[in-house]
Amino acid sequence: MSNMSTTIKHIHIVKPASPTPSGKMYLSESDQASAITHAPTIYIYRRPSSDQPFEALVQTLITSLGETLVDFYPVAGRLRYIPDAGGRVELECNSEGVTLIEAESDMKIEDLGDFSPSPLISSLIPRVDYLTQPIEETPLVLVQLTRFTCGGISVGFANSHTIMDGQSAMLFISEWCKRARGVVDPVRPFLDRTILKPSGGGGGVVDDGNGGDGGLHEDYTPPPLLVGRSDDREERRKETAVTTFQLSAKQVAKLKSKANLDNASPKPYTRYEAIAAHLWRCCSKARHHTASQATRVRIVTNISNRLKPPLPPAFFGNMVLRIGVEATSGDLINNPLGGVSALIRKKVGSVDDKYARDALAYLERQPDVTRFRNYHSLGCTKGEFFGNPNLEITSWLSLPLYGTDFGWGPEDYMGPGGIGFDGKFFVLPGLDEDGSVVILLRLHVECMDEFKKCLYEDM
């Protein structure tokens, strides 16, 4: 496997097919607090149904991408740091374009295994060099179309998380697919992010002991450290591994049933609430925490329908907040699964219009936003670290992930192309959408076997 390689054949810069508006576009506080790096995703097509030559497929993608960028013109722009603004950036709509890379691999699809993020998968996704390439010269979207020796194709994306979350990325890709297939039924994005401008407010703030406006919003306090530690440097340095676990529909139903055994609420716990609670408990067990160890699970929460009025269905940007639920490991392990599910439900349920706008207002007041960002780059020491004793769960259960058809049929696999730090989890529906769930994660190597045992045996 070490001799396998991917060779870049051509690099295309694709610009909007017709003139588009120019100038600066407002970025919301949710945008500013999101990762400054690019989120990697990968689509795998084992047997493309098109009988067109590869070069023709590439040309179709180039043409349709240019057409798509007319409506999604901010994607063709560039970010710039605002001087003396605490790491904040602005979006310059200047039609500089996005990058489409044409590549060939001497691999077969089967060489990629179960498609968990790996160096081989990384070779199929455009790489961004954040150390040497200025941000104002970095495309916001980079795409790599790779042809395999077996005839398969992969499409790898690197999407700037500053300008779009997962839901917005799905909208952009879906609209590109339509145009590539010649479908004339566009859904035009809602681009005005000023509807997320804070209007004051200060709820959810805990006093930091300094008085004034120095309080810390409850979701933005520094995450807990291991008992006896003063920093997270040792945990950042430990060896980690990435893996994929699958829960069958039957196993998901079993978890939900277990969570609802002692549920006094008339509303049963959802599969997400049960799975998130189970992952949190398993992490604490696998990490062998002391009973008094504080641990936080950070949950990426969509606020679009929690605002009043709700955001437009085609809103394009970041419509998420990262909220935290905290407990001790002893409480997690000693309480039933339903009790942990209740903690998660209570916190997520508290995120309403006021809560969300107060959080955005809090972020707006901060002199420096860089500490709130995490990074997709493995080994990065910048930004917050949500590894041991904590974790972060991103759920794609409600996203329209599948059926990404550029004209050669739907994908055989779709998933994250990288997982940047210990304790990061992605939860996806099974490809057949039969009630099964796929869990991708990165954990310290020393914890992985115990985690797997807990995942499957503690249901």
Image (cartoon, helix red, strand yellow):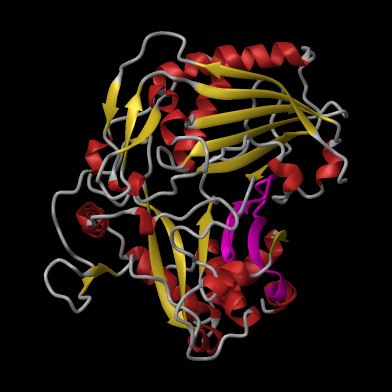
Q: Is residue 67 above or below residue 248?
A: above
Q: Is residue 192 above or below residue 456?
A: above
In depth, the one of 222 and 219 nearer the eye is 222
The question of residue 348 being in magenta is answered with: no
Q: Is residue 209 above or below residue 297?
A: below
Q: Is residue 391 left or right of residue 350?
A: right
Figure quadrant of residue 431: top right
The percent position of residue 411, horizontal first and vertical second, equals: 70, 34
Quarter of the image where the N terminus is located: top right
- Residue with the most extreme top position: 18
The question of residue 436 being in magenta is answered with: yes
Quarter of the image where the C terminus is located: bottom right
**Would residue 182 be seen by someone viewing this image from the given angle?**
no
The percent position of residue 83, horizontal first and vertical second, equals: 26, 41
**Would residue 398 be seen by someone viewing this image from the given angle?**
yes
Query: What's the magenta region?
Result: 420-447
The percent position of residue 229, horizontal first and vertical second, equals: 48, 83
The percent position of residue 344, horizontal first and vertical second, equals: 43, 70
Residue found at x 76% / y 16%: 54
Residue found at x 57% / y 67%: 236
How many numbered discs? 0
Residue found at x 31% / y 61%: 351
In depth, the one of 103 and 184 nearer the eye is 103
Figure quadrant of residue 432: top right
